[in-house]
Image (cartoon, rainbow, N blue to C red):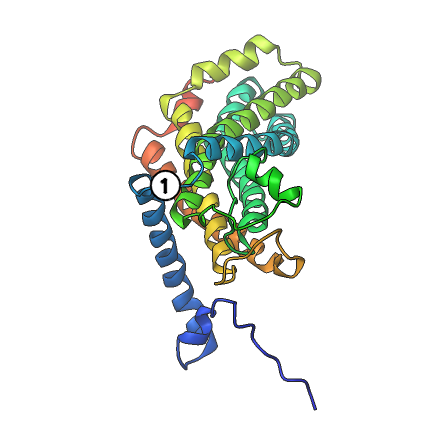
Amino acid sequence: MHPTRTIPQNLAPRWEESVGSGPAWTQSWLLSPILYFGDMALLLAAALGAPFRPRAGQPRLTSVVARQFEALLLSGLPVVAAIHVGFGAFLAMQAFFRATIAEANGAVVGLGMMRSVAPMLSGLCLAWLLAVRCHAELGGGLRRGLDDDPADVLDRDLAAGRSGPDPRPLPEVGRVVLARLLAAILVGPLLTAWGATVGFFIGAVISRRMLGLTPGSYFGFFFEMLQVPDVLSLLVTGSGFAAAAAMSACRESLRSAPVVPREGPVPLALFCPASIGRAVVYALITMLVMNACWFTLAYQAGAPFGPHMVAKSPTD
């Protein structure tokens, strides 16, 4: 006989167990988007209302945001830089293979980075970083002292064995989500601009070494082609993609958390790679939709930028 599989009582019931009977593919393809966006709306409402609710015993929101921001920035800078080195070189090499006009290589690399490549790649990096970080922090459930300063006196007393009734209240879900959402929104444009800068300067090196293009021509044509939507793209898409990644990471982490609040570190058994993968996939789908909407609004709604580049080409 096969052993009976029991479901732990302290785990939240999965939504698949409560949707009723019906074909599995129908439940998956029709109800998953409804559940996902419904959870997003509830989490966003709780996060936006958190500053207006009393925060007795809770750490200051600004200090939590600052710590989350610092962690994301320091971990994201090397990852974003490394991935943009290859893409900056790839865009610059298009002129070497006659795919673009060599004299316009600065505009091709710089504007390509700002309009599409840097926001998507930086968003992908943030999606993975946030998914792993949020699951490590929230995947085991909310706990006392979750967002407290690591140097807090009470934490030191508890670590030293001077334990007793913990007077700290459990963290409120809205404040937890809001802190990570604000940190992501702040760090998103910085990482996007950092990635675009790294790729742009790598393209300048490639253009100089392989095409003989002078830095004056490379940078001059880029600034000549630069438009206001290109600068706004770093801010809008950088913040928007980071917000989507943060919301998806928080949603999947909290969805897999136990109902009963836990104490102590995250058990290894609760560190589920499947939840991390789902958070990244949902975030990327949301980013693709947001990117298509922004591209249509910022560029296609105005003068097309393709003919504008051809008109300014020095070879004409």
> Percent position (x, y) of residue 299?
35, 32
Residue 48 found in image quarter: top left
Q: Does residue 81 appear to the left or right of 258 in the view shown?
A: right
Give the residue at x 48% y 55%. 254
Residue 7 found in image quarter: bottom right
Other-residue count near label 1 (Cα within 10 Å), few / some / many at <14 / 14–19 / ≥20: some
Q: Is residue 179 visible?
A: yes
Q: Is residue 314 visible?
A: no
Compared with residue 224, is residue 126 higher up or lower down, i.e. above or below? below
Compared with residue 89, is residue 49 higher up or lower down, i.e. above or below? below
Q: Nearer the viewer, residue 3 or 79?
A: 3
Check disc 1 and give the amino acid type: Arg
> Percent position (x, y) of residue 163?
60, 48
Give the residue at x 52% y 68%. 10
> Percent position (x, y) of residue 120?
51, 38
Q: Secondary structure at mark 1?
A: loop
Give the residue at x 64% y 34%. 79
To which residue does mark 1 refer? 55
Q: Does residue 104 appear to the left or right of 32 in the view shown?
A: right
Q: Nearer the viewer, residue 156 or 184?
A: 156
Q: Does residue 294 appear to the left or right of 124 in the view shown?
A: left
Kindly give the residue lying farthest to the top in the view shown: 216
